[in-house]
Image (tube, rainbow, N blue to C red):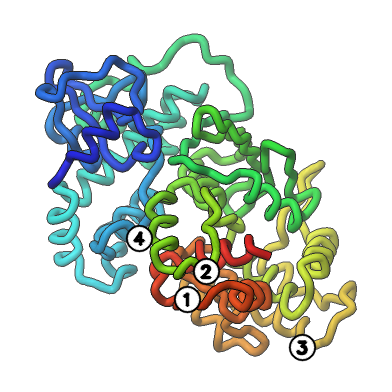
Amino acid sequence: MDTSHWQKARQSRDPRFDGLFYVAVKSTGIYCRPICPAPTAHEKNVAYYQFAHNAAQDGFRPCIRCRPDSAPGSAAWQGTKTTALRAKQLIDQNDEHDCEKLAARLGISSRYLRQLFKQYFGVSITQYRLFNQCHFAKKLIQETHLPLTEIAFAAGFKSIRRFNDAFLQQLNIAPSKLRSGDKKPTSTLILTLPFRPPYNWPALQGFLQRRLIKPMEWITQTSYGRTFASDKYKGSFTAEFIASKNHFSVSINIDNTAYLQPVINNIRRVLDLDADINLIETHLSANINNAFTVCEGLRLPGIWSSFEAGIRAVLGQQVSVTAAHNLVTKLVDELGEKEGDAVYFPTAKIVTNSDFAFFKMPQARKNALHNLAHFCALNPENDDLDEWLSLKGIGPWTVNYAKLRGQSQPDILLDGDLGVKKAQAAANPFEPANCAPFRSYLTFQLWQQL
């Protein structure tokens, strides 16, 4: 592996490489992020690792100063090892821990999955899962007031003893030694979620503001927040953009901390914090034939769930952004669950049981809403949105919009969208297919030209 560019990034503390590799210092036995503020070690004392778990496997312990557990993640489309990276992402997101179920989800045998994982990441799936759980627990220990017992369960451990043993084995330090005694208990958790710059917050903020559904969502010049809910938990978050430190400070309220990890991962997706935006923009610039100037740091603004994105898409069919916004606001006002000051997006079951009498729209559009909600109520775990195409009133644009914003898939070109067509017509000719696998970013770049 050629590490010459990593050497330059380490020496300059380039934040664009944060989370893309890790630096281990042989003389101290510690591994760090490339942006670590500690004095730069001599090159002869340094070893480079693409993944933090490989450094830990070689006996290095995480730096308490720069905290490798807080580095931005890597997207599932990185590199060519698609299946192995997808498996890693599902484990990172706490979506799947069982190897057999993980293999079935990826459409391969468990034996082949184990071989792929060992080949590309140098550890077994079980070892990586334990490391990932401990890394997440370490972040909670150092950033929140949560008791260690609650942290252990939030990280997916079944017992405190197993948590302590795994933590010591994986990170070479006891969890109790990381907990400072000055944290005051509070119902709100505040976590730091970093990103690799550049990050065009004004563009993201403007996009979200034009589509903001009050009071379910809220926004300021420097922050975005919303409520969220499932059948297992409810809560809200507010993410404050801290440009000078390349991170968001995120306040989270949740009634069941056992589901904290998937909530944090979804916040990262909604804000598109794990994109290697420099790689994406370099690729787009090289393949658009000077059709337009690529807007720096443009991210994909996500929607909390595929179901919500699908409902928003149906209500946005063949109408303006303003008209669609008014319809979604009306839907949430009429059907959204209310608890005190909190308002949540309506569930699939609630939408299924509504006759939409409050909507002045063609019955066919109401039927499409009902069909989609009924399907999602019966198939809550389904993430293959192409199955929606069998539903009357649901077409490719709706499905692709849900993939784009509800799942944050990176390679969705909304070529049927009127705004995309206008932007393409106004630009110099180019071949969008050459922009794969980042055509979702191309879509937002084209919208930005309007």
Q: Disc 2 and disc 4: Cα gap in Å?
A: 25 Å
SS state under label 2: loop
Q: Disc 3 and disc 2: Cα gap in Å?
A: 39 Å
Q: Is residue 317 left or right of residue 65?
A: right
SS state under label 4: loop
At horizontal 39% and vertical 56% (from top left) the residue drawn is 282
| Extreme residue in the top direction | 182
At horizontal 60% and vertical 39% (from top left) the residue drawn is 254
Q: Is residue 334 left or right of residue 104?
A: right
Instruction: Identify residue for label 1.
Output: 430
Q: Earlier in the sequence, mark 2 or mark 4?
A: 4
Instruction: Identify residue for label 4.
Output: 77
Residue 90, x across and y down, in percent: 36, 56
- Give, as a three-letter code, the residue at label 2: Ala
Q: Is residue 257 left or right of residue 341?
A: left
Q: Earlier in the sequence, mark 4 or mark 3?
A: 4
Q: Residues within 10 Å of mark 1 (few under 14, many from 20)?
A: some
Q: Disc 1 and disc 4: Cα gap in Å?
A: 23 Å
Instruction: Identify residue for label 3.
Output: 364
Instruction: Identify residue for label 2.
Output: 291
Residue 373, x across and y down, in percent: 66, 74
Give the number of the mark in front: 4 or 3. 4
For the question of whether residue 160 can be seen, the reply is no
For the question of whether residue 75 can be seen, the reply is yes
